[in-house]
Image (tube, helix red, strand yellow):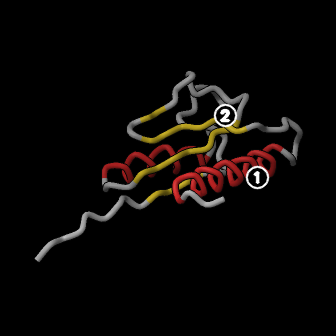
Amino acid sequence: MKTEKKSPLKIAMLGHKTVPAMDSSRGGIEVVVEELAPRLVEMGCEVTCYNRTGCDNGGLSEYKGVKLIPVPTFKRKGLAAMTSSLHATDKSFVEVKQQLNVA
């Protein structure tokens, strides 16, 4: 009996400031994402974190097996989380479309 190899579960994490946080921008959600994302990678998942621009992560493109992608952010109170999340959602959809070869 032939067993098909399953592709890894792909997870996009967005809404946080940056992972890993190298400055004082580290809040509760950043702690959760910074701890959870590498553990999901260890379990065989493919994890991408969409980080806000303007938050210091040491210029990393990968952290403990987690792919890090910067997304544009409007640095205005009340807009930063929303705009970075919208840009991250857009980037993740584009990535999925490319992988599926959807026009």
Which residue is identified by label 1?
Answer: 86
**At x 61% / y 44%, what residue is drawn?**
50
Give the image location of residue 14, x and y in percent.
63, 51
Label 2 crowd (10 A; few <14 / some 14-19 / many >=20): few
Q: Amino acid at mark 2?
A: Ser
* Residue at the image position 46 percent from the left and 33 percent from the top: 62
Q: How far across and down, in percent of the image, does residue 72 sit?
A: 76, 37
Of residue 19 and residue 46, the one placed in the foreground of this image is 46
Real-space Cα separation, disc 2 to disc 1, in angstroms: 20 Å
Of the numbered discs in the image, which one, if any, rests on residue 25? 2
Q: Residue furthest left?
A: 1
What amino acid type is highlighted by mark number 1?
Answer: Leu
Q: Quadrant of the C terminus?
A: bottom right
Q: Which of 5/49 is in front?
A: 5
Q: Quadrant of the N terminus?
A: bottom left
Q: Which mark is residue 8?
A: none
- Secondary structure beneath dot 2 equals loop
Mark 1 element type: helix
| Residue 35 screen position, x and y as percent | 44, 47
Residue under the point 52% across and 50% down: 32
At x 67% / y 48%, what residue is drawn?
91
Image quadrant in which you'd find residue 64: top left
Taking 73 as reference, is 7 left or right? Answer: left
62 lies above or below 2: above
